[in-house]
């Protein structure tokens, strides 16, 4: 009799990574995804018939993804075309011009100096050096290891390196430490914004998270075809290794016996026996009983106060005027503290910072669209993760859109200039939509917020309290973002392999090519 497959619930980046690696090791794998395509948060939605990226847009840590393809018996270059960006992002404030950062740190330092003076350039260099030092301390002992607790982390770093532990500055807020490097409040805003990459406030996160800035300085790549091309490539590799994908297959229950996991049940009523399940969903869904009351002990439900940020996300077709755009652009609010205080109070900011991904613009600002045609944009404003308790009305959506457009205009960009034959066309995705798409999160897009020194240790790891049940995805250790979600998938696959060996489940062998099987349909969300 053939061995029961490992079942992966969800075809997000973490689940796809686990599927590709496990299948390359000869483990039979079935992926069950409730949507109609792979990707999870990496997805596209249509505006007037045009697909627009609606998920992550920044691709970093290329070696992580390269290693995953190699472990799956493939080559990244055979599946994706990547172009390294010379210009990382453009940052704008009302009335004070704009500042570009570059892949070359010295070029960035020169740009900072021209923007804010020689002292600011020196501050950028000292900040970059500290961020690199923190990253170097934590990369292998923490980011690439299964969930370490503080004593375990001390052992991994080295008990003799007490100074290194203090150097990661876990007990000081990032906003405070940024003041040691930058007098200019605009630069504190710019480098504080990196904490929003993991859905957190710079006023509450430890200074340790300045390592995110170093990650970006190590390289940002554009993927031909957008981020969905990465999801499709991982799926293709997994299929080649024999993984079965079933779309429109919503899992409603995970079942256990005295020995651990015993199977899953679909919305259609179909039961699939298995002894190992990787849940590529927010672990809070387990703790909230989404997959069955008996699964609540697998993970703790996430309290509303602990949720990371959600977002208001506009997908738009527009003809921009004003400030020249590059691919990644940030338009800052005049009062960062007020902005995050409003979010903390449960409100979308009235004068928000807005991130604009000009999808048809290369890093130098040239549009890939024909002259005069509408271009594609994804615009993000941070919002509270209250989508399960607050339904955004049409009036609120209109007001949020008006506030966002006012911020862009204040910084010199108009996406809906008067007199245009075709006004801006858009659709807006709210925390309510994200809450529906990702159950038990309230729309939190990054799992648990990274607030306080212990937050990183409170994020669930790949193993749960139930034998044979594992977690992967951006809400698990090591954290949010495409490369981190991929690392979580790697850690989950290593845990499955280790446990199969220790319990004599594991039998290496070849598996025939995979297939995609339709199952019970589910309604699209977002």
Image (cartoon, grey):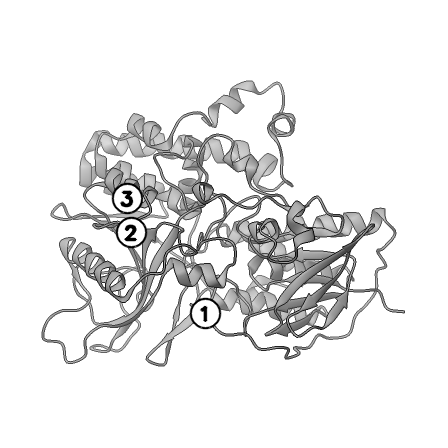
Please tell me how many numbered marks the rendered image carries.
3
Nearer to me, 447 or 256: 256
Q: Residue furthest left?
A: 419
- CA gap, disc 1 and disc 2: 21 Å
Nearer to me, 223 or 468: 468
Crowdedness near tag 2: few (<14), some (14–19) or many (≥20) residues, C-alpha within 10 Å: many
Q: Is residue 293 left or right of residue 58?
A: right
User: Which of the image's four quarters has the N terminus?
Assistant: bottom right
Nearer to me, 351 or 286: 286
C-beta proximity under 8 Å, tags 1 and 2: no
Horizontal and vertical percent position of residue 453: 48, 30
User: Which of the image's four quarters has the C terminus?
Assistant: bottom left
- Whichever of labels 3 and 2 marks the residue nearer the N terminus, that label is 3
Horizontal and vertical percent position of residue 134: 47, 32
Give the labeled residue for mark 3: 342
Q: Residue furthest right?
A: 1
Res 525 label? 1
- CA gap, disc 3 and disc 2: 7 Å
C-beta proximity under 8 Å, tags 3 and 2: yes
Instruction: Give me the residue at 48% from left, 63% from top.
Output: 437
Horizontal and vertical percent position of residue 302: 52, 45
Give the labeled residue for mark 2: 348
| SS for dot 1 | loop
Residue 184 position by quadrant? top left
């Amino acid at each position: 009799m053939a061995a029961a497959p490992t079942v992966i619930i969800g075809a997000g980046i973490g689940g796809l990574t686990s599927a590709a690696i496990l299948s390359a090791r000869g483990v039979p794998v079935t992926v069950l995804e409730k949507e109609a395509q792979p990707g999870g948060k990496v997805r596209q939605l249509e505006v007037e018939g045009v697909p627009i990226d609606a998920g992550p847009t920044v691709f970093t840590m290329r070696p992580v993804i390269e290693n995953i393809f190699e472990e799956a018996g493939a080559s990244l270059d055979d599946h994706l075309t990547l172009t390294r960006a010379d210009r990382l992002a453009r940052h704008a404030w009302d009335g004070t011009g704009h500042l570009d950062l570059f892949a070359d740190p010295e070029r960035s330092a020169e740009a900072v100096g021209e923007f804010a003076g020689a002292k600011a350039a020196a501050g950028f260099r000292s900040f970059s050096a500290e961020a690199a030092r923190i990253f170097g301390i934590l990369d292998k002992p923490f980011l690439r290891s299964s969930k370490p607790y503080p004593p375990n982390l001390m052992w991994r770093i080295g008990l003799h390196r007490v100074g290194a532990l203090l150097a990661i500055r876990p007990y000081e807020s990032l906003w405070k430490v940024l003041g040691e490097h930058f007098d200019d409040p605009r630069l504190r805003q710019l480098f504080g914004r990196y904490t929003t990459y993991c859905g957190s406030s710079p006023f509450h996160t430890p200074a340790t998270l300045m390592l995110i800035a170093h990650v970006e300085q190590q390289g940002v790549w554009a993927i031909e075809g957008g981020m969905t091309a990465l999801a499709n490539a991982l799926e293709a590799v997994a299929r080649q290794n024999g993984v079965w994908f079933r779309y429109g297959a919503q899992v409603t229950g995970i079942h256990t016996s005295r020995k651990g996991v015993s199977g899953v049940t679909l919305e259609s009523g179909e039961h699939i026996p298995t002894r190992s399940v990787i849940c590529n969903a927010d672990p809070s869904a387990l703790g909230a009983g989404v997959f069955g009351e008996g699964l609540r002990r697998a993970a703790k439900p996430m309290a509303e106060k602990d949720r990371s940020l959600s977002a208001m996300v506009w997908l738009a077709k527009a003809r921009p005027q004003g400030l020249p755009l590059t691919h990644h652009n940030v338009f800052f609010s005049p009062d960062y503290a007020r902005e995050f205080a409003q979010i903390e109070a449960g409100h979308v900011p009235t004068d928000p910072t807005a991130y604009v991904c000009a999808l048809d613009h290369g890093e130098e600002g040239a549009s890939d669209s024909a002259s005069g045609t509408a271009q594609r944009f994804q615009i993000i404003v941070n919002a509270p993760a209250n989508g399960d308790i607050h339904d955004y009305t049409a009036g609120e959506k209109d007001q949020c859109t008006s506030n966002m457009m006012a911020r862009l205009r204040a910084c010199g960009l108009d996406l809906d200039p008067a007199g245009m034959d075709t006004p801006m066309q858009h659709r807006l995705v709210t925390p309510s939509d994200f809450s529906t798409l990702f159950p038990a999160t309230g729309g939190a897009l990054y799992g648990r917020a990274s607030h306080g020194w212990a937050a990183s240790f409170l994020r669930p790891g790949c193993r749960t309290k139930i034998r044979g049940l594992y977690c992967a995805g951006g809400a698990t250790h090591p954290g949010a973002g495409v490369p981190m979600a991929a690392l979580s998938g790697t850690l989950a696959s290593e845990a499955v392999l280790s446990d199969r060996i220790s319990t004599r489940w594991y039998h290496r062998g070849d598996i025939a090519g995979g297939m995609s099987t339709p199952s019970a349909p589910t309604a699209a969300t977002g």
